[in-house]
Amino acid sequence: MTNRLLCVLLGLTAFACPPPPTTPKPLTLSSEGGVLTFANDGTFTLSRNGTVLLRFDSAAFQVGTVRELDATRSYDPYWLVVDDPVLQKVEPPGFKWRTLIKATVTRVSESEVTIDATFDPDVTGRITLTTATHGFTARFVPATDVRPVAMLRVRPRSNTTEGFYGLGEWFDEVNHRGKLRPMQLEADLSVESAYTENHVVTPFVIGTTGWGLFVETNRTGVISLARGGEDDLVDSMWGTAEQSGDGLTLQLFSADQPIDLLKPYLQVTGAIRLPSTWAWGPLLWRDESRDQAEVQDDVATLRRLDLATSAMWIDRPYATAVNTFDFDPAHYPDAGAMIQTANAAGLRVALWHTPYLEPNAGALRQEADTNGYFPVTSGVQLNRWSSPLDFTNPAADAFWRRNLLAYRALGIEGFKLDFAEDVVAGLSGSRGNWTFFDGSTEKTMHAQYTRLYHRAYRATLGDLDGFLIARAGKWGSQQTGLVIWPGDIDATLTKFAEAFTDRSGKRVVGVGGLPSAVRAGQSLSMSGFPFFGADTGGYRHSPPDKETFMRWVSQSALSTVMQTGDSSSQPPWVFNAENGRDDEALAHYRRFARLHLRLFPYGWTYARAMKETGRPIQRPFGVVYPSLGHPADQYLLGEDLLVAPVETAGARQRTLIHPPGVWQGWFDGTTLAGQAGETVTVAAPLDALPLFVREGALVPMLRPTIDTLAPATDPGVESYENDAGDLWVRAVPSTTATQFVLFDGTTVRQQRDGAVTLSSTAGNRFTKGVVFELYLAKPSSIESNGSAVPFVADLNAVTTGAAWANGLLQVKAPVGSTLVLR
C-alpha cells in the first residue's frame, strides 16, 4: 500500500499527504537530426517522431586492447572476421574486446552530454555527444595509459528487417543486410581479380527506417551488417592503433525518408561538385588508339554514322612513356590539330593518366628520383611502372601540376584517373610498409592517397568543371567532381563471383559484368557519388557478344554517364565474328545513345538540385520504397523513370516489383499491370529494356536530332551548347496537376480534367518551342492559347502544330503557350 493511498483511507487532507512520486524526466538532446535519449547506465537511443531508430546498449562501445602495440602489424580489423575459403583470420597477441561495465552520464549543456565509461576491467574512456545542424556528433575517446589500445568498436542495433545502403561501391548487392564490408581494398582470392573490388569507400551506412551513421576516419575498418544471427546489429570495428588516443568521431543523422539522409552526410563531408555538362555523354574511347590518324578517323566515323557523342578520351599508349606529359611525335605528329578536329565535331577530349613515372621517362624521372618525389619507403608496387608520386610532398605535388599544364594548353579538358591503389593497408594483419614525406603511413594513406591524387588534377582544371573519371575514391572525394567507373569488370551478363567459361575455354570466377555495374552504380549513388559510368559492354574478356552489348547499351543509356569502350578496342561500328555485332546492334547503340543524350535536361535538373536536396539522380528501389523490398536489378532515374535492366542471357521477359501508382511503358504507352508491391512479369525484347514513366510525370528532353552537348563548329553537327533548340517533354497526364521546373528555370505543367492541359514558361536556355509528346487517343481538337492547332506532316516546318502516329501524340507550340487537348 502506497503512502498516499494510506492518507486517503485515513481521511487526511491532500495538504497533509506527501505528493505522489514523480518519474525523473529522461536526459535528452534534440536537433533536426532527431532525439537522443539517455539512461543512467550509459545506454541511449536515437529516435525520430517518437520512433526509436538506433539503440546503443551496454555493448555498443568497446575497446580492443593488446599486450603491446607492434609496429609491424596493421591492426586492420578485417582480419579478425575475414570470411574467405583461403585467407585465415588473424588476431593480434593478447587481443581482447572490453565492454562497458560502469558509466556516469552528465549533461554539460543543452547541447552536450558526456558518458564517462569504464570498460572491463580497468580501461576508461569518454563518449561525448553534441548537437549539430546535421544531427549529432559523437566522440569516442579511450584512455590509453593503462593498456595499449589497438582497435575501437561501435555496434548499435537497429531492427531486424530494414535495408542497409551506402558504404561505397559494391558489386554483389545494393542492400548490405547480411554482408561483411571492409572499409578498404582487401585481398579476395575467390575471384579472378584477387581483391574485393570496393574501389570507392565511404564508412557511411543508411538504414531504411530513416537513420544514418558516418564514421569520420581514415583508419582501416570493417562493418558487419545483421550477420551471425544478430539481425538487428550494425557492428563496426576500426584499427586505431597508435592513434587510439585521438578517438573516433561519429556522425548520427535521421530523416523522415531514407533518401534524404545524404543531405546531412554531404553537409559534413563536402558538397558534390558537378562535372561539365558534356560529361553526361555519351563518350567513346579505345583501349589502345594506334595513332593520330585513327583518332581522327574515329571522330569522322561517329559523325558519319550519326552516333550521338559529346566527348572522347584517348587511352594509353599515346605519350613517349608513362607519364611524360607529351604525345609521342612518331604517332601523334600534331596533337593540337587532332584535338581541334575533335572539338570542331562537338567532342571534348580527355586523356588516360596515372600517378607514375616509368624508368624510361627521361629527364622527368631523373628529376623525381633526384628530388625525392616518391614515397620515403614503398610497399608492394601494384603497377608496372613505378612507385606512386608522393603528393604529400609539396614540391612533388607542384611538379606534377606544373607538367599537367602542357596538356591543358593543348586543349585537354579532362582525365581518366586510373590505378593509384598501390597503398594498401597490408595482408593478413601485417603492415603494407609505406611511409610518405609528411610522415604518414598506409594506415591512413590507404584512404588519403587517392584524394591527393585527384586534387592535383582538379587544381589543373582550374575554373573549368571538366571531366575526371576515376577508378578509386574515398569519402569526401565527391568535392573533386568525380565520375566513378568500376574498373575492369567482365564483358558478360554474369554476377560477382559467378563462374563462367571464357573464350579460351578457361573456367573463371569473375568479378561480374552488367549485374555488377548495375549494383555498383546504385551503391555509389547512396554514398555521395552520383555520377557513374561503367565500360559499356565490360572490359575483362572483351569484346562482349552481341546480346551482352545490346543489353548493356540499354542500361548505360538510363544511367548518369554513358561511356563505351573495352579492352578489345572495338567501337560500336566494328563488326566481326568475335563480337557478333551487326547493323542491328549498331542501330541499337545509335538509338539508345541518343536517348541518353536527349535525357540531359531531365538528369541535369536532378544533378543541380543535389546541392539543396542531397538526393541522387539514380535511386535504389529499396531506398525509395523500403516497405516493398530491396531488389538490386531495378531502380529509379530521378523521380519518374523506373528502369529494369535485363541481366539474364536469353531472357525476353523479366519480373519486377510494381511501385506505387500508375506507370506507363516508355516505348509503347502500355500501362504496367498490377498493384504496388506485386511481382509482375513484363516483356523484355532484345532491342529495348523495361522502362516505365510515372503517371503525372513530365520528362524534359532535347530534340531528337541532337548530336552533342559540347560546342561544335562543323556544319551539320547539332550542339546543345550552340543552340538548346526546342524543348521536348514526355508527358503522362493525371488528374492531379503537376509541374517540372528545369535547371534553367523553364517550367512545364500538366493536368487532366476532362481535357488535358499542357503549358510552359520560358527559362534561360529553352526559349523557343516546346513539343509535348504523350500516348493518347487522337484528340478531336487541340487549342493553343484559344486558337486551333492543326495536324501537320512535319513538325519541324511549323511553330505550332500536331502529329499523331501509333498512339503517340506530339504537339508543338512556342514556349509560354497553353495547350488544351479534347
Image (cartoon, rainbow, N blue to C red):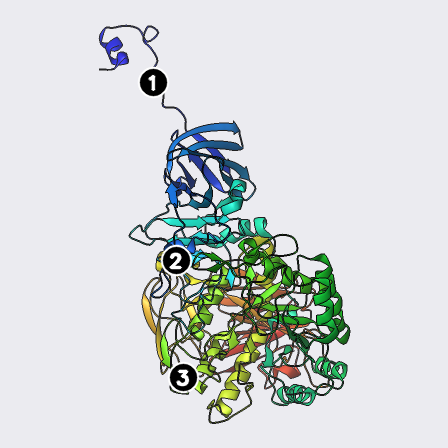
Where residue 21 is drawn, which disc sits there?
A: 1
Q: Amino acid at mark 2?
A: Leu
Question: Where residue 718 sits: x, y (%)?
Answer: 67, 81
Marks 2 and 3, how far apart in space?
29 Å
Q: Tell me, yes or no, whether the two marked residues, 2 and 3, touch with CB atoms within 8 Å.
A: no
Please say if 44 is above or below 452: above
Alpha carbon of mark 1 to alpha carbon of mark 3: how far? 76 Å
Q: Secondary structure at mark 1?
A: loop
**Which amino acid type corresponds to the residue marked 3 in the rendered image?**
Asp
Give the structural element (helix, strand or loop) at label 3. Answer: loop
Q: Earlier in the sequence, mark 1 or mark 2?
A: 1
Residue 4 falls in image quadrant: top left
692 lies above or below 741: below
Q: Which residue is mark 2?
A: 180
In x, y percent, where is residue 428? 42, 59
Q: Residue at x 75, y 73 (%)?
A: 363
| Separation (CA) of disc 1 from disc 2 | 49 Å
Q: Nearer the N terminus, badge 1 or badge 3?
A: 1
Q: Position of residue 608 (x, y in %)?
A: 61, 60
